[in-house]
Image: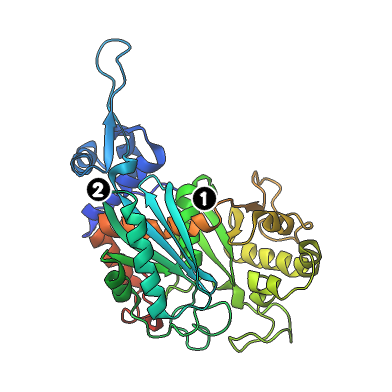
Amino acid sequence: MALRGTNQEFGRPYNRRIVLESIRLNGPIARGDIARGVGLTVQTVSTIVRELEEQGYILSLREEPKGRGLPPATLRINPEGGYAVGIHLTPLGIDAALINLSGDVIESMHSEAPNVTPDHAFDQIGAMVRDLAGRRAGGRVLGVGMALPGPFGVESMSFIGPTTMTGWKDVALRERLTTATGLPAFFETDMAAAAMGERLYGLGTGYSDYYYLYFGVGLGGAMVHDGSVLRGAWGNAGEIGHIPVVFGGEPCPCGNRGCLERYLSLEARGRWHGSDDAWVAEIGPVFRNAITIIENLFDPETVVLGGLAPPALLERLAGAAELPNSVSARKDRVTPRIVVARGGQHAVLRGAAALAVSGVLSPRFGQIFTAKRQRGGDLLKGGDIAA
């Protein structure tokens, strides 16, 4: 899953990013070990490390010598070297968290704001960010990242129905977020942000290729390959909730019938008048077929089941019954076909904050990466998703 250095045109900021990530994931770690892990020279790594140390993002430590000579200095992230704010906007409300460079949630808060309008949302977000930033007087707040439901830029699906942000079409999200907070702003779909948070700070650290199934108000997912979230040409890869799974089934606001999230989502659970056990028994076959579809499409090491649903409910789904056959039903596999994440809301907020950290510390890389996927302007309708 390790990222590798590059000599391409945007190599310097990219190398800076992967050196910082190597230290975060593996620290305390020596310069030589970083160089071997990311495929750069020790000289290049040393230059980047010196810059990061001077800026306060990392710390250098040296153990007491146990024999002749000095042991090599080891490096680790300076948790207090900076902070970012993660925002999660859903049809139910707004969550925000102040997160340090180690991915620790320092402070968090929630605002009940069902089906919030853009004007009210940005007023709330601005106040929340100021409150959170004020709790770390003198702390360096690098930026703000926001996650919200997708898909983006699809006329028949975006901002339509109870699982989307109805009324948010044509909102200049990055501009509004920067104006409201005074910080560099970035945004992403909630399922991709959650997958990123899980990769950086959760179960995803143990896998190179896994599928993150995001169980929120709606249903989405993201395939993580070699440490990167696959997004597709317009940034909407993973909208598994709109795969029709029941022929002639329930109408979906997208215009199709029998879409997966009409049966498997918090919105669907809310329409069910009964216990969790009864609901799991009812939709269990649909869930198991969905896992089989994911496995046959992506062949992941495992499916990480996470999102906003209570862990107990996710555990019931994961253990409901034996899964059907698929390409992942191998005799030589050493991991379960489904594992349940524990990050919950924090996975989304950490992933959103990580967008800001990467975007600010490696701005040139972020601009190029975004440009490769961008198909419109800085409006939600245009499919612009910040890296």
Q: Nearer the viewer, residue 158 or 30?
A: 158
- Residue type, mark 2 in image: Gly
Seen as rendered, the residue at the extreme top is: 67
Marks 1 and 2: which is nearer the front?
2
Identify the residue at image location x=36%, y=32%. Answer: 28
Identify the residue at image location x=32%, y=49%. Answer: 136
Q: Secondary structure at mark 1?
A: helix
Q: Nearer the viewer, residue 59 or 69?
A: 59
Q: CA distance from mark 1 to mark 2?
A: 33 Å
| Residue 218, label in figure | none
Quarter holding residue 358: bottom left
Question: Where residue 213 sits in the image (x, y, percent)?
Answer: 59, 62
Question: Where residue 94 sits in the image (x, y, percent)?
Answer: 47, 67
Identify the residue at image location x=39%, y=44%. Answer: 102
Q: Secondary structure at mark 2?
A: loop
Question: Where residue 377 sits in the image (x, y, percent)?
Answer: 31, 81
Task: Give the residue at mark 1.
Answer: 204
Task: Give the residue at mark 2.
Answer: 138
Quick one: quadrant of the C terminus? bottom left
Label 1: how many residues lie within 10 Å, few (<14), some (14-19) or many (20+)?
Answer: many
Above or below, comparing residue 381 to residue 113 in the picture: below
Marks 1 and 2, the one that precedes in the sequence = 2
Question: Where residue 327 sits in the image (x, y, percent)?
Answer: 67, 59
Q: Nearer the viewer, residue 19 or 268?
A: 268
